[in-house]
Image (spheres, helix red, strand yellow):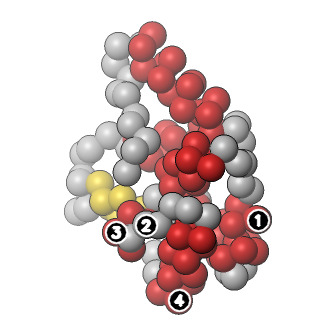
Amino acid sequence: MSKITYNFVKLKAKLELLTGKQYTWAYIAEHAGVSQNTMSSWVNNRTARADLTGLAKLLDFFSAEGMPITIDQLFTVQEEGADDRDSKLLELSQRNQNPNRVVSAIGDAASCVPFLPQINLPL
């Protein structure tokens, strides 16, 4: 069975690289007009239901910040048995709030450890 997860960690990292700004999840939630609890549930993939109104607000937020995205970019579909790269990125980003260091750490780790897959951020 395929696994569908939210893609917010990658999107936030890409937005921060694009704008040169750092965003907190609280800031994104507030400026998108969704609750911090909802944002947290999405980021940590603790919900199986999609709030289309809330997701539309996030599309508007990213567009207003200069990075228009489409609804399909909010999700990642993982086939059964595939590497769980998004959860690795989420785990690293939760330990370190600076996405530039997260991306750097992933790149460094992938170059030093031959069995660790490279994670590409561009969506």
Residue name at image x 43 percent, y 66 percent: 69
Per the image, label 1 sits on a secondary structure element best described as helix
CA gap, disc 4 and disc 2: 15 Å
Q: Which residue is mark 1?
A: 26
Residue name at image x 38 percent, y 23 percent: 116
Front one among 51 and 64: 64
Mark 1 is surrounded, within 10 Å at the Cα level, by few (under 14), some (14 to 19) or many (20 or more) other residues, namely some
Q: Is residue 77 visible?
A: yes
- Amino acid type indicated by mark 1: Ala
Indicate left or right for 102 with 70 as reference. right
Give the vertical position of 61 relative to 93 (above or below): below
Give the vertical position of 85 relative to 49 (above or below): above
Contact between marks 2 and 3 (CB within 8 A): the answer is: no
CA gap, disc 3 and disc 4: 15 Å
Per the image, label 2 sits on a secondary structure element best described as loop
Upstream in the sequence, badge 4 or badge 1? 1
Q: Which residue is mark 3?
A: 72
Contact between marks 4 and 2 (CB within 8 A): the answer is: no
Upstream in the sequence, badge 2 or badge 1? 1
- Amino acid type indicated by mark 4: Thr
Per the image, label 3 sits on a secondary structure element best described as helix
Per the image, label 4 sits on a secondary structure element best described as helix
Q: Which residue is mark 4?
A: 53
Residue name at image x 51 percent, y 74 percent: 59
Mark 4 is surrounded, within 10 Å at the Cα level, by few (under 14), some (14 to 19) or many (20 or more) other residues, namely few
Upstream in the sequence, badge 3 or badge 1? 1
Contact between marks 3 and 1 (CB within 8 A): the answer is: no
CA gap, disc 4 and disc 1: 18 Å
- Amino acid type indicated by mark 2: Ile
Numbered circle sitting on residue 69: 2
